[in-house]
Amino acid sequence: MPRRFDLDDGSLVLIIGSGAGGGTLGNELAQKGIRTLILEAGPRIEREQHIDDERQAFAQLAWLDKRTTSGSCGLAKDSPNFPAWVCKVVGGSTVHWGGCSLRVQDHELRAKDVYGDIGGTNLLNWPLTLAELEPTMTKQKIRWG
């Protein structure tokens, strides 16, 4: 039976994504007795269900969302609409990491501006803006083959 939580329950920590960061944080909080809920978009793949062949595992684990290959990166230019090897399963990219990281979005660096003051937190913006980081990021070349 699914658990239900009140939307205004301030005693619950909600974590989006069960990868290396979310899964580790959720485990640490839960072990300290803090009520923790981790949401994951993909299924749980048990060890015996895992396909140990990279090509076949792609269909089982990959996030087949075209947004993962949009924009101006080499993968999007060279292979438009080819889904990146980003896992959409419990454990995220700890299950299989294909060397692909989604580009940082402006709002992710401006958390305080986007969400405002949240009581009991020390939410801050990054000291650099996306505009300041982009010249360095666009110099990086992706080489294939």
Image (spheres, grey):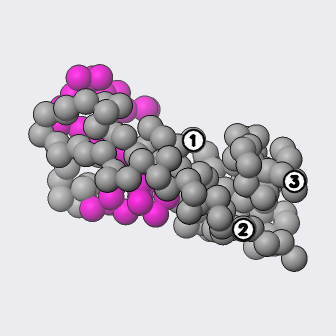
SS category of the residue bearing label 3:
loop
Q: Is residue 128 magenta?
A: no
Q: Is residue 144 above or below residue 64?
A: below
Question: What residue is shown at x 25% (from left), y 45% (from top)?
Answer: 124
The amino acid type of the residue labelled 2 equals: Lys
Q: Is residue 3 magenta?
A: yes
> Which residue is tagged 3?
79
Closer to the chain start, of discs 3 and 2, is: 3
Q: Position of residue 54 (x, y in %)?
A: 80, 70
Mark 1 residue type = Ala
Badge 2: how crowded within 10 Å, few (<14), some, or many (20+)?
few
Quadrant containing the C terminus is bottom right
Are the residues flagged by discs 3 and 2 in contact, CB closer than 8 Å?
no
Give the label, 2 or 1, closer to the camera. Answer: 2
Residue 115 in sight: yes
- Report the residue marked by disc 1: 41
Start-end of magenta stretch: 1-28
> Which of pointers 1 and 3 indicates the residue nearer the eye?
3
Looking at numbered disc 3 in the image, what kind of residue is underneath it? Answer: Ser
Work out whether mark 1 precedes mark 3 in sequence or the reverse, and give the earlier one. Answer: 1
- Real-space CA distance between mark 1 and mark 3, rounded to the nearest whole angstrom: 25 Å
**Mark 2 residue element:** loop
x 50%, y 47%: residue = 131
Query: Regarding mark 1 in the picture, which secondary structure is present there?
Result: loop
Q: Residues within 10 Å of mark 1 (few under 14, many from 20)?
A: few
**Residue that sits furthest to the top in the current view:** 7
Taking the image as shown, residue 93 lies to the left or right of residue 114, namely right
Q: In the rendered structure, find residue 66 and report the number of the disc placed on it.
A: none
Which residue position is annotated with label 2? 141
Q: Quick check: 88 above or below 10?
A: below
x, y percent for residue 135:
57, 57
Q: Where is residue 71, by image quadrant?
A: top right
